Amino acid sequence: MSHEKENKHFQDKAGLKSEKVEEGKPGSPGPGTLTDEPGSRSSIQTVAKPAGPSGVPEVLPVSTKQSIANFLSRPTEGVQALVGGYIGGLVPRLKYDSKSQSEEQEEPANTEQAIIARVSIDNRTRALVQALRRTADPKLCITRVEELTFHLLEFPEGKGVAVKERIIPYLLRLRQVKDETLQAAVREILALIGYVDPVKGRGIRILTIDGGGTRGVVALQTLRKLVELTQKPVHQLFDYICGVSTGAVLAFMLGLFHMPLDECEELYRKLGSDVFSQNVIVGTVKMSWSHAFYDSQTWEKILKDRMGSALMIETARDPACPKVAAVSTIVNRGITPKAFVFRNYGHFPGINSHYLGGCQYKMWQAIRASSAAPGYFAEYALGNDLHQDGGLLLNNPSALAMHECKCLWPDVPLECIVSLGTGRYESDVKNTTTYTSLKTKLSNVINSATDTEEVHIMLDGLLPPDTYFRFNPVMCENIPLDESRNEKLDQLQLEGLKYIERNEQKMKKLAKILSQEKTTLQKINDWIKLKTDMYEGLPFFSKL
């Protein structure tokens, strides 16, 4: 009995002490709760141990490891300041949003500014369209059309608003005015918006020219024979002309400047002698610090002198000018290089090409970017993009050209595609080496990247018969792309002519296809479509 009374007395005494503590600190936290007060007794957590033999529970401190774990498990600012930078990534509860409050406040502000900017662009587009529609004077119309063109070049997202404002029917009617300057301005803005006229023949006709430096002389021989058989210049034979590197030079000469083939070849040879002339020692030194054997500044100066400062889209002012494109490779957008298309046209709102590109660049910039072959010329910085030779990705641009044409004329069938190579060299020499040098390995990588025959094999197997025509002679000598000696260029010309003689029947078949005129039904359909577009799809017979 005395032992039980002693235990009861001890428990009552402990209860009184706890009541006094609670009365003295009514707001004190309970066990296991952290506090910032320096005198707080609860900063060390305690647990009750089961009663011993005497029946009195023993109070023991929790282990240091358990206390630290509980401390770290609470995502307070103190914890983050202490260990957030060291072990925060290891403790899931310590992870917190890395965005500061100021950044969170800036995001809605930036979004709001973007919305305001887009609304401003749309309102500006509507105002320019309405101002143009209210103008009756042809001279003032030219100014209004050019203002709208500059606006859409700077803000391409405004094209959709312009189309919704029914600008295309008005422009088509405006194109009927007997004023050449006004007609040219209207053709430019229609090309920028993405409106296209009907194709020249019974279907889409495409010409593509591979890269290959001065070996482009070979492609010129094929074109010379084609012009001879059809009695038409190149720019009148095709709806779309696309080139890579030296092929882009030829595409611009023939498609944009409408140069005769004799003059084109003469200029081509002169460009080769002017550009690919370099002292070996000087070129080697330049290669070591600029990765370019030849003088890129000289090449740029020649391009500026020959092509001026005209934009790609400005070539659409010429009614005889086909759609023309040059291809380069962008090497600073992500890990994988990407093809970039310099166009003299735009895509209709809502139609997106798989390939990057634009029409707001100068013609000489397009050639400079497309011909920036690594090791020969320095890469070309244009805006925020870094361009290299288009042949690094698409030395045979036939597939790209087909895709672009389907974006322009989605409902028109493909009549023919003519793909011109610059000659290939195939060696039958076999060796038994079991090891290749670093130079050989790099050469194999470059040859694989610039290969043109894989695209040819694919298209030849997929396209219908008498649709795809590829001309790429096998050369008896591996002539480099920077060859500028006249005797070697004459050799290229001779081999190209011999190849054409061996494939004369193929050339005649192609010339026959390119000479076909549209059927009467196709001409009627084109006329109906034009009138429907001019009068917004309404019955137009009363308007005639």
Image (cartoon, grey):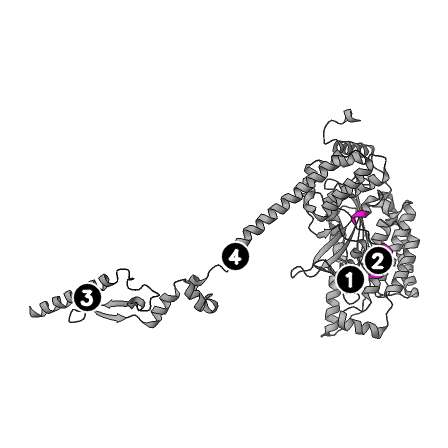
Q: Nearer the viewer, residue 179 or 497?
A: 179
Residue contact between numbered discs 4 and 2, judged by CB atoms under 8 Å = no
The residue beneath circle 1 is 372
Separation of marks 4 and 2 at Cα, in angstroms = 48 Å
Q: Amino acid at mark 3?
A: Lys
Q: Which residues are magenta?
A: 300-314
> The disc labelled 2 sits on which kind of residue?
Lys
| Rendered position, 469 above or below 429 | above
Residue ranking furthest to the left: 1
* Residue at image coords 91%, 51%: 260
Q: Measuring 77% from the left and 31% from the top, which residue is drawn there? A: 531
**Mark 2, residue position:** 304
Numbered tag placed on residue 17 in the rendering: 3
- Outermost residue, top side: 542
Q: Amino acid at mark 4?
A: Ser
Q: Earlier in the sequence, mark 4 or mark 3?
A: 3
Question: Please, what secondary structure does the residue beneath circle 4 have?
Answer: helix
Comparing 374 with 106, the one in front is 106
Q: Quadrant of the N terminus?
A: bottom left
User: What is the spatial separation of the Cα atoms under label 2 and label 3, in whole angstroms?
Assistant: 97 Å
Q: Nearer the viewer's eye, disc 1 or disc 2?
A: 2
Residue at horizontal 75 percent and vertical 71 percent from the top: 440
Earlier residue among tags 1 and 2: 2
- Upstream in the sequence, badge 4 or badge 2? 4
Q: Secondary structure at mark 3?
A: helix
Q: Position of residue 179 (x, y in %)?
A: 85, 37
Q: Residues within 10 Å of mark 1 (few under 14, many from 20)?
A: many
Residue 102 — which label? 4
Is 342 positioned to the left or the right of 495 in the image? left
User: Number of labelled discs?
Assistant: 4
Give the Cα separation between the discs numbered 1 and 2. 15 Å
In the rendered structure, the answer to whether residue 263 lies left or right of residue 400 reads right
